Image: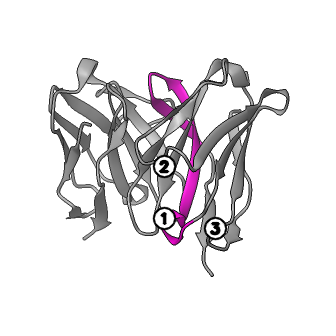
Amino acid sequence: QVRLVQSGSELKKPGASVKVSCKASGYTFTSYGMNWVRQAPGQGLEWMGWINTNTGNPTYAQGFTGRFVFSLDTSVSTAYLQISSLKAEDTAVYYCARDLGLGILDYWGQGTLVTVSS
Amino acid sequence: EIVLTQSPGTLSLSPGERATLSCRASQSVSSSYLAWYQQKPGQAPRLLIYGASSRATGIPDRFSGTGSGTDFTLTISRLEPEDFAVYYCQQYGSSPFTFGQGTKLEIK
């Protein structure tokens, strides 16, 4: 069965960096794109962008350029989200989600809570 | 960017009743590329509907989606206790993909 398992919660200080992993299993990793979605505490869902797992080409939504980097390690079927120069407003749950095609998010990771606090 | 506005913000109903959730787009959603997701507290969202009206794998037939252009609806024909959650619409017809702000379906 398809599973996306994300790394555990992180507590970081402002200015630090964090790398969230999303390990896929149960399907051919490079056959489906991977999206990233942010959910701030008590708020709705915000699409951050996606990465083509075949070519490694990332696409970032406005507001997620510069400090946010999507990457892959196809040898272990894992996608990564790295955030640098963390700010308090980056505190959120970050989800990876498989792209069934065209942007339909059919399987989601369990989410990773990133807390930025001094 | 396409802005999605969901209404109502909160819907209070009883099990067995019918729920109608609305999602209105600021401009036409191409090819009815509109999806609905359900999210329960502490859980990841779950895909319910895509292409405005196609049910995702394993979704009960009490969930149905309709609409085109700028107006879309998610209907739950007979509410079960497990259906009380937050529902989000999402358009994927143009980048950036966007979500509505959500409708909370609560037990009356």
**Which residue shows up at 54% across the image and 29% down it?**
A99
Whole-percent x and y of residue B99? 34, 45
* Residue of label 2: B45
Say if labels 3 and 1 share a chain.
no
Q: Which mark is residue B41?
A: 1
Q: Secondary structure at mark 1?
A: loop
Q: Is residue B104 above or below residue A76?
A: below
Give amino acid for label 3: Gly
Whole-percent x and y of residue B56? 45, 30
Rendering quarter of residue B22: top left
* Residue of label 3: A15
Q: Quadrant of the N terminus of chain A?
A: top right
> Which chain does the residue under circle 2 lie in?
B
Q: Is residue B75 above or below residue A39?
A: above
Q: Looking at this view, is B97 or B73 the one in front?
A: B97
A89 inside magenta stretch: yes
Give amino acid for label 2: Pro
Tag 1–tag 2 contact (CB < 8 Å)? no
| A72 sits to left or right of B89 | right
> Which chain does the residue under circle 1 lie in?
B
In the image, the segment drawn in magenta is A87-108
Answer yes or no: is residue B80 visible: no
**Which residue shows up at 70% across the image and 52% down it?**
A20
Q: Secondary structure at mark 2?
A: loop
Query: Which residue is situated farthest in the right direction here?
Result: A75
Q: Secondary structure at mark 3?
A: loop
Whole-percent x and y of residue A114? 62, 64
